[in-house]
Image: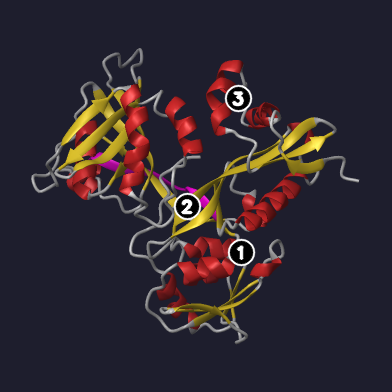
Amino acid sequence: MTGYEIRALAAGEERAAFEVLGRALHVTVTDELWRRRAASFPAERRFGAFTGEQVVGVAGSFAARLAVPGGKTLPAAAVDGVAVRADHTRRGVLTALMAAQLADCGRRGDVLATLHASEATIYGRFGYGAATRGKTVRITPTAFRDDAPAGGTVRLLTTAEARELLPGLYAEMGLTRPGMIERPEVWWAHARERLIGEHQVAVHTGPRGDDGFVLYRTEARRTFDHPNRGAALVVQDLHATNTAAAAGLWRFLLRVDLVSEVHAPGRPLDEPAGAMLTDPRACAVTGVDDDTWLRLVDVPAALAARSWGPGEPVVIEVTDPQLPGNTGRYRLSPTGTRSTTAAADLRVTPETLAMLYLGDARPSTLAAIGRIDVADPAALPHADTLFVTAVPPWCGTGF
């Protein structure tokens, strides 16, 4: 006897579910907060755990497309709100919610599911693996090198202008790295209120028009002992179609008056901001953290969609107890993938496969720490080159 029922949310139950999420995140859900979030928290694609008529758990997502190695995009579920009320945890509620959500993703044709994990110990048991990472940089204002890319202009937008311009600009810029996702209207419904409404927005314009933007806010750093200390700029969102646009935005941020440092969390691992400065030590990497976690909902479709590096074919065996249709052996080669009955070279769990899929982790690294069962050690260097990507994966979108 479970004492709860898992079912899709019905119209009119959204706020009750949002209250559960708010409590789990230690946020008080006021009428004003709900007014701002209602449009981005629809019943569609959302499941609740109910005891009688009370919502005690919630798991939701929105539909998006996610870029995979090689440039294709796949239908994906962006999981944007999972919580269980504190007095109903450790009763199997979360497991039941995640099972219902994964089954629903499969019915809808989602090939992938992705999320930002509030706690790193939760989602591995549901087949999610850390698939993209981001670095946090702290930059002290300094000069740019003479040979750093230059050109173009930067203009500040009003809130109204930003709300109108950014959705189209992000869409036009495209998904240029594995792991990046579309930002559908349900995402922008929240972003227009919270992100844009609470940040300054600047846009870079190059020879072909607008080609980059940044959202940032200021945080005071004055203290009793340091009353003249400049503020910190915190970068929330920075995207550019080319290096010159990115350089223009960083140059703009570092020239804002009365600023002592710029903080930028979640940046691409290979972003060369420091190399453009006369003093590269002015750009310090203060941390590297997992960003998005990935779940392959349809393993055959996901493997068939991405490109593969050079290397001899490798047979991997996947065992997926939650989505048994994924269980099988797959031959990976530079020319594509197919199911096979050949003996497995490497055996992986869904979590481990997710860590490899976008190119963030190397098979040999995970094998060395026991995350891959290796039947043929000679297959590891081939697997490394097959899974390699030209650039590190990165999402760059919070949800």
In the rendered image, residue 139, in percent from the top left (x then y), is placed at 27, 37
Query: Above or below — where is 352 with respect to 138?
Result: below
Query: Crowdedness of circle 3 by 10 Å Cα count: few (<14), some, many (20+)?
Result: few
Instruction: Give me the residue at 46% from left, 76% from top.
Output: 383
Is 179 placed above or below 188 here? below
The answer to which of 353 and 5 lies nearer the viewer is: 5
Q: Position of residue 144 (x, y in %)?
A: 14, 40
Q: Amino acid at mark 3?
A: Val
- Frontmost residue, 193 versus 376: 193
Q: Which mark is residue 350?
A: 1
Q: Helix or strand or loop: what does disc 2 sit on?
A: strand
For this orientation, the residue located farthest to the left is 146
Total labels: the figure holds: 3
Residue 290 in magenta stretch? yes
From the image, state whether disc 2 or disc 3 is nearer to you: 2
Determine whether the residue tagged by mark 1 lies in a helix, strand or loop.
helix
Of the residues shown, which amino acid type is indicated by label 1? Pro
Q: What residue is rendered at 37% in x and 28% in y?
A: 163
Report the amino acid beneath label 2: Arg
Residue beneath disc 3 = 27
Evaluate whether residue 264 shows in this view: no
Q: How is the image coloured?
A: secondary structure
* Neighbour tally class for label 1: few under 14, some 14-19, many 20 plus, Cα within 10 Å: many
Q: Residue furthest front?
A: 11
Q: Which residue is located at x 87 percent, y 40 percent?
A: 3
Looking at the rendered structure, the secondary structure element under dot 3 is loop
Q: Tell me the distance, in whole angstroms, between the alpha carbons under discs 2 and 3.
A: 30 Å
Magenta residues, start to end? 282-294
Q: Is residue 48 visible?
A: yes
How far from the left and from the top, in percent, is residue 93?
77, 44
Nearest to N terminus: mark 1 or mark 2: 2
